[in-house]
Amino acid sequence: MNELARLHLNGLRALEAAGRLGSLTAAAAELGVSLGAVSQQVLKAEAQLGQAVFVRSSKGLQPTAFGHQVLPHLNEGFRHLAAAAALSRAAEQNSLTVSVAPVLAAKWLVPRLNRFTAREPDLKLRIEASIDLADLDHSDVDVAVRIGKGGWPGVTAAHLLDHKVFPVCSPALAEKLTKPEDLAGIPVIRDNGAMFTWDAWLAPEGHQGLHLSEGPVYSDAALCLQAAIAGQGVFLAWPTLAHYAIASRQLVAPFPGRHRTGFAYWLVTSAQRPKSAKLRAFEAWLREEFAAFADEEESPAAG
């Protein structure tokens, strides 16, 4: 391998292409460079090797004795390099990287992914759990699922589902809640990272500014949910977070109202890069999942 340190790869590529194709013109066309550039690369490579690889004649390029020795090795070497590049492309074509907030990933997306893999068994998903804005133009992230108001610059955001909130608590605490005013006498669990306040639910119920009791404060919505399951108080949750806890009767929604926060779930893609087939497949599946989930949550049995 030390012999390669004194040689430039572009020069070796030029030698291999010129020898295989029999002319500098054909080599320049394959490599996407000018005739003068490929000629200079061949001359520099020959100088680095210390021997002529070709004899220039009216019939084009003819390998020298040394050329007959070295060109087969170059042909074989670049075939291996091309095969390695093809493997990389195949891996890229068969994988999709999705950036999604950790809570949404854990509580809603991941439990549903078996349905996507059943539909697209050859496509490998990589889930990047992050709340940071993804660089969809220059990173390996293909698509992001975000909660917000949309309108982000430089990306395409497709609406998936409005974000709604409602109180949840343990079944035992729910027995003490018959009307919204009863919230004043129950510990309230707070998420100090929330994008909204309790008024997002209280105002549509006609109780904006209702004084709420103090309760435990957590920095993560999933922790707040676990605290509610443990009976520590009532928490202002949302369907994608609390769905399974309610379905398993770990939590109940003591009041029927579910109200919009002004935020929504969005599928975010690059505005510059065209959508690949794998991305279109994931988007179609995700839209179906959100639509089915919305229908389920709006059914009379929900909550």
Image (cartoon, grey):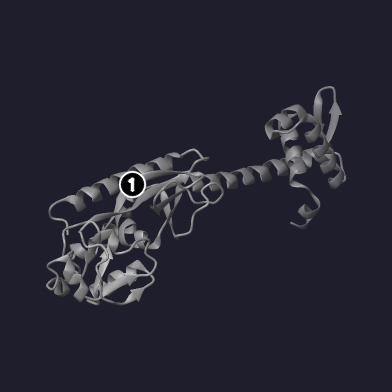
Q: Is residue 53 visible?
A: no
Q: Is residue 26 left or right of residue 93?
A: right
Q: Determine whether 34 is above or below 239 in the image.
A: above
Picture quadrant where residue 55 is located: top right
Q: Is residue 277 left or right of residue 13?
A: left
Q: Say which residue appears at 25% left-offset and 55% top-offset.
A: 259
Nearer to the camera, 277 or 145? 145
Nearer to the camera, 72 or 226? 226
Nearer to the camera, 82 or 214? 214
Q: Is residue 7 left or right of residue 202?
A: right
Q: Is residue 211 visible?
A: yes
Q: Determine whether 87 is above or below 245 in the image.
A: above
Q: Determine whether 21 is above or below 220 in the image.
A: above
Q: Which residue is mark 1?
A: 160
Pointer 1 local density, CA inside 10 Å: few below 14, some 14–19, many at least 20: many
Q: Say which residue appears at 25% left-offset and 62% top-offset.
A: 208
Picture quadrant where residue 72 is located: top right
Picture quadrant where residue 106 is located: bottom left
Q: Say which residue appears at 39% left-offset and 53% top-offset.
A: 148
Q: Quadrant of the C terminus?
A: bottom left
User: Which residue is outermost to the top?
Assistant: 58
Q: Position of residue 84 (x, y in %)?
A: 59, 48
Helix, strand or loop at mark 1: strand
Q: Say which residue appears at 40% left-offset and 53% top-offset.
A: 146
Q: Position of residue 34 (x, y in %)?
A: 76, 31
Q: Quadrant of the N terminus?
A: bottom right
Q: Position of residue 81 (x, y in %)?
A: 63, 46
Report the number of numbered marks: 1
Nearer to the camera, 241 or 9? 241
Q: Is residue 29 left or right of residue 276?
A: right
Q: Amino acid at mark 1?
A: Leu
